[in-house]
């Protein structure tokens, strides 16, 4: 926990951007009946019946000090998908960075082994050399700011039924563009000192004889 908190309080360094990474899912639901037309001021009305149309995975990249986020929509969240996200991060999103400081949870696919599964050894090692990884502790995913951003995405963009993957990509892309343009970010205030006081029960007790 303190390791992640220390990362969040480092000064901004464009050569070593801090990126929080998380993933979520969205079920696509198609209407079985045409929704009733609405008038100005009315709440949209939907029939309770719907048709399931698959589920898409959403990989979220969030750089709080750059006020930037990106959501990649995929059909799955396998080791290969994770590895491709890491290559995108290094080669597309932050190609000029000397090192990318990456905060994420300890999911079984979030391993260096995933890159060796997806790429030749030299390519996997090239990507790994650009990453400085800090894992959130078990039951401590709330420390990942990308989880906060994912929650905002669900509240602002994904509350309504979305019928297919194409519509999901369109809506999420528009949300991402608007939020980046506005410079929205998370101002993290919880410190190591706060943790030692408020979460003291999580620390081991040491008795001096």
Image: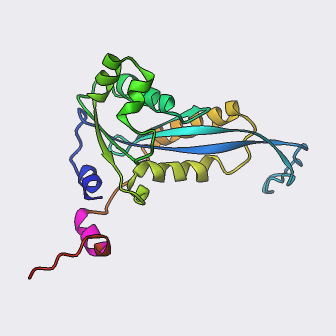
Q: Main secondary structure of the magenta part?
A: helix
The one of 25 and 151 positioned closer to us in this rendering: 25
Q: Is residue 129 visible?
A: yes
Left or right placement of residue 48 versus residue 3 in this view: right
Q: Is residue 196 above or below residue 113?
A: below
Left or right placement of residue 182 versus residue 143 in this view: right
Residue 56 position within the rendered picture, expressed as x and y whole percent measured from the top left: 64, 37
Residue at image x 39%, y 57%? Answer: 138
Q: Is residue 102 magenta?
A: no
Q: Which residues are magenta?
A: 192-199
Q: Is residue 87 visible?
A: no
Residue 82 position within the rendered picture, expressed as x and y whole percent measured from the top left: 46, 33
Q: Is residue 75 above or below residue 33?
A: above
* Residue at the far front in the pictured view: 209
The one of 61 and 76 positioned closer to us in this rendering: 76
Residue 142 position within the rendered picture, expressed as x and y whole percent measured from the top left: 42, 58
The one of 203 and 195 positioned closer to us in this rendering: 203
Q: Quadrant of the C terminus?
A: bottom left
Left or right placement of residue 209 versus residue 178 in this view: left
Q: How many marks?
A: 0
Q: Quadrant of the N terminus?
A: bottom left
Residue 146 position within the rendered picture, expressed as x and y whole percent measured from the top left: 44, 48
Q: Would you identify the image quadrant in which residue 73 lies? A: top right
Residue at image x 85%, y 55%? Answer: 48
Q: Is residue 198 magenta?
A: yes
Q: Is residue 55 above or below residue 155?
A: above
Q: Would you identify the image quadrant in which residue 14 lies? A: top left
Residue at image x 90%, y 43%? Answer: 34
């Amino acid at each position: 926990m303190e390791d992640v908190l220390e990362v969040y309080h480092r000064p901004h360094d464009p050569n070593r951007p801090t990126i929080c990474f998380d993933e979520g899912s969205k079920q696509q639901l198609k209407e079985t009946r045409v929704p009733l037309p609405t008038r100005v001021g009315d709440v949209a009305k939907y029939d309770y019946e719907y048709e399931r149309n698959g589920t898409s995975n959403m990989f979220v990249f969030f750089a709080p000090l750059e006020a930037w986020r990106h959501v990649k929509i995929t059909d799955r969240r396998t080791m290969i998908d994770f590895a491709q996200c890491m290559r995108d991060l290094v080669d597309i999103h932050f190609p000029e960075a000397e090192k990318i400081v990456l905060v994420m949870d300890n999911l079984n696919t979030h391993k260096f082994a995933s890159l060796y599964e997806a790429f030749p050894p030299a390519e996997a090692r090239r990507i790994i050399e650009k990453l400085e990884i800090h894992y959130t502790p078990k039951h401590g995913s709330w420390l990942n700011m990308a989880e906060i951003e994912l929650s905002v995405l669900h509240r602002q963009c994904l509350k309504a039924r979305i019928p297919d993957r194409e519509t999901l990509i369109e809506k999420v892309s528009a949300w991402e563009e608007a939020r980046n343009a506005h410079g929205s970010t998370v101002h993290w205030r919880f410190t190591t000192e706060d943790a030692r006081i408020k979460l003291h029960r999580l620390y081991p007790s040491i008795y001096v004889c």
